[in-house]
Amino acid sequence: MKRTFTIISRLVLIVAIMVGCTNDFESINTDPTKSSPSTFDSNYFLSNAQWTYADGITGYSGPVLFQSGWVQLLASTSSGGANYYSNMDKYVPSSNTNSYQATSWNQCYRSGAFASEMIKNTETDPEKVNITAVGRIVRVMSVHYITDVYGDAPYSQAWKANSNVSLPEYDTQQNLYKSLLADLDGALTSMDASKAIPSADIFYKGDFAKWKKFGYSLMLRIAMRLTKADAATAKTYAEKAAAGGTFASAADDAYVIADNANGYRNNYAGSLMTAADYYQVRWSKTLIDYLSSTSDPRLGVIAEVPQDGLKNNQDATKPGNSTPAAQLGLPNGFDLNGGATDITTSPGYPGGTGSGADATPIGKYSRPKTAIYGNFNAPVFVVTYAQTELLLAEAAVRGYNVGGSAAEHYGNGVEGAMLALAPFGAAATIDAAVAANYAAAHPLIETSNDASLKMINEQYWATSGALMNFAEAWNNWKRSGYPVLTPVVASGNFSNGAIPRREPYPTTESTLNTVNYKAAVDRLDGKQDSWSAKVWWDQ
């Protein structure tokens, strides 16, 4: 399904929010001679909420500079100082780390603000019940991302500056999760197929049935985060989601197609196509080895080895070699500094390419394929059928009543993971027969629950990584423990040599919303706003 973003370029509107104590206030910059709540179409808040969310979960907003390397999907030879990929590959701060760690918080709260304004303008109109419901779903989606990345966060008191709440309390994650699930359930049960559908919708163009499936698939994701922290609630809502109807195929996948011509570019492409990034960021050895071990069809689709030599490695117009057998992942934690951690000292180092001034020591390592991930109009994935089916497979392993067996759901997930790449374009499209045959040839191992859970969650990690859904791969790794990863222990790292489990709160929170910030920090491990503290459900 093709989705475009041109609708947003027709809306000149700023919604500013007050979350924590910032200088923004929840208001609409409206000319009263031209628009009023009674004449303004609140549907237009939806596209802004959707895009702002997509913007907050991609690129330099956080995931590519943090979670992509933490969970060992990407690797980089960057190191220290202003070379910002040290944040992800070695957990070493750069000059802008504080700015990077705040961006997802700010953008996702802005997304929630747009959704909140949409709700306020429609919730009293019974004819617009679906528009209100969609706004509530998007708001849940935004705060869910925030709490998974940071921990306790404002929700019950968020976006209430107009009610004189300028210093919102942080809901505990335990209470926040209950609220998110209840609010999502309420939104979905309120929807009415006979009423108006949302317009200005860049996920589904107002498709009522797809929004229902999206909402229940999101519910499943939220529920499964609780398998260790609150197994009873996880089971209740996972079963409710399955009964309500989750995604039925990859055609239901929720994503946004970026619109670079109108100023809405794919932020992953924007970051990875930056000159230094393009040269030094590669797929990790962990991922490439995983895909190679089963001759996964995605290997030759998502990866390429650059042409020989430094100049060719840095030239985005030169396509690389996508032959699966040629792919080689870059091990995490190495650099180009000539010391003990120089890439040339890594075990199994294959040698470089080129010679003399045109030599490059990383020339043989696989990068994200430029034709796919270098496209500024590429899709930004939010929730997919493949991820949903893999979570249903795990739910079945755990004994939840979600319809179908764990093996059936796992097979659907593997097949859907192949087909999910198609929105990247023809170069990323895997034939349906190839996907089906691969899934059939690699069924779920059911010799034990542990073996099944390992296989399911490793597939979830790789599937999310191929879609550049890095934070989701990291969150599910925190919950499941799969794949088993060995942390990088680099000098000067900010997480005591452990893989980071959260992002610290924006620095403005400690100075502007001090009392509520301190209360939230006191609930963290060691009462420290640290990278290694675990959020409540991370047990």
Image (cartoon, rainbow, N blue to C red):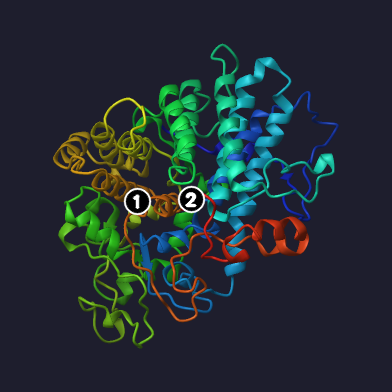
Where does residue 367 sit, x and y in percent of width and height?
A: 32, 63
Which disc, if any, is residue 440? none
Amino acid type of the residue that numbered disc 1 sits on in the rendered structure? Trp
Q: Residue at x 40, y 66 (%)?
A: 278
Q: Quadrant of residue 140?
A: top right
Q: Residue at x 64, y 20 (%)?
A: 129
Number of labelled discs? Answer: 2
In the picture of the structure, the residue carrying the numbered disc 1 is 461
Give the position of the N terminus as an image quadrant.
top left
- 23 to the left or right of 59: right
277 or 20: nearer the eye?
Answer: 20
User: Contact (CB < 8 A) between labels 1 and 2?
Assistant: no
441 or 418: nearer the eye?
Answer: 441
For the residues labelled 1 and 2, the Cα–Cα distance comes to 21 Å
In this rendering, the answer to whether 359 lies above or below 408 is: below
Secondary structure, mark 1, is: helix
Where does residue 161 sit, x and y in percent of width and height?
A: 80, 44
In the picture of the structure, the residue carrying the numbered disc 2 is 266
- 96 to the left or right of 382: right
| Disc 2: CA contacts within 10 A as few (<14), some (14-19) or many (>=20) | many
Q: Earlier in the sequence, mark 1 or mark 2?
A: 2
| Disc 1: CA contacts within 10 A as few (<14), some (14-19) or many (>=20) | many
In this rendering, the answer to whether 345 lies above or below 271 is: below
Amino acid type of the residue that numbered disc 2 sits on in the rendered structure? Asn
Where does residue 187 sit, x and y in percent of width and height?
A: 59, 26
- Of marks 1 and 2, the one in the foreground: 1
Where does residue 71 sit, x and y in percent of width and height?
A: 39, 60
Secondary structure, mark 2, is: loop
